[in-house]
Amino acid sequence: MKKLSMLLALLLLLCCLTGCGGAGKSADQRDAEGLCTYTVSCLGQNGERVEGVMINFCTDSMCTPVISDEQGEAVFTGPAEAYHVQIVTVPEGWELAGEEEWITEPCSQSFRISFREVGK
């Protein structure tokens, strides 16, 4: 019984360390050139897709702006680094409903940004 308990504890620890069951991507997923894709979903409070949000993906030396598409997704592909992600502009009729910036983990991030309609 003691060996079984130890085995279960080790499996639980392994799952925690590898991100088993976590939200979003958790594994390092590089393409053939060693680049990673980071996806930000821009959604309204009722699930509406928010097009036209300008988001910066920044390192210590540069920022790359990306604009959310008609699906409400801003997709950035770049080297595996931790990026400082910032909301730069929000389309007319919308406002940010939470934080304005985040730090990603290298090559492992997809997340949602919530917005609310203004004047509704």
Image (cartoon, rainbow, N blue to C red):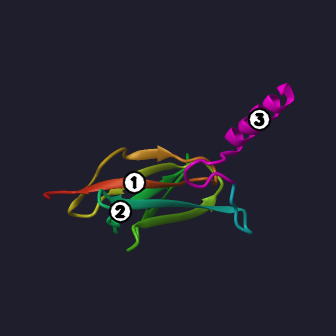
Secondary structure under the numbered disc 2 in the rendered image? loop
User: Which residue has dot 3 on it?
Assistant: 8
Q: Which residue is mark 2?
A: 53
Alpha-carbon span between mark 2 and mark 1:
10 Å
**What span is in magenta?**
1-27
Q: Mark 2 or 1 closer to N-term?
A: 2
Residue kind at label 2, given as amino acid type: Val
Q: Label 3 is placed on what type of residue?
A: Leu
Q: Is most of the magenta stretch helix, strand or loop?
A: helix
Magenta residue check for 85: no
Judge whether 32 appears above or below 95 on screen. below
List x then y, in percent, for residue 26: 63, 51
Q: Earlier in the sequence, mark 1 or mark 3?
A: 3
- The one nearer the camera, 102 or 45, is 45
Residue 45: quadrant of the picture: bottom left
Check residue 113 in the rendering and tell me which mark sits there, or answer none.
Answer: 1
Total numbered labels: 3
Could you say where residue 44 lies in the image, as x and y percent from the top left? 31, 59
Extreme top residue here?
2
For the residues bearing labels 2 and 1, Cβ distance under 8 angstroms? yes
Label 2 neighbour load within 10 Å: few <14, some 14-19, many 20+: many
Q: Tag 2 or tag 3, which sits nearer the N-term?
A: 3
Taking depth in this image into account, of 60 and 9 the one nearest to the observer is 9
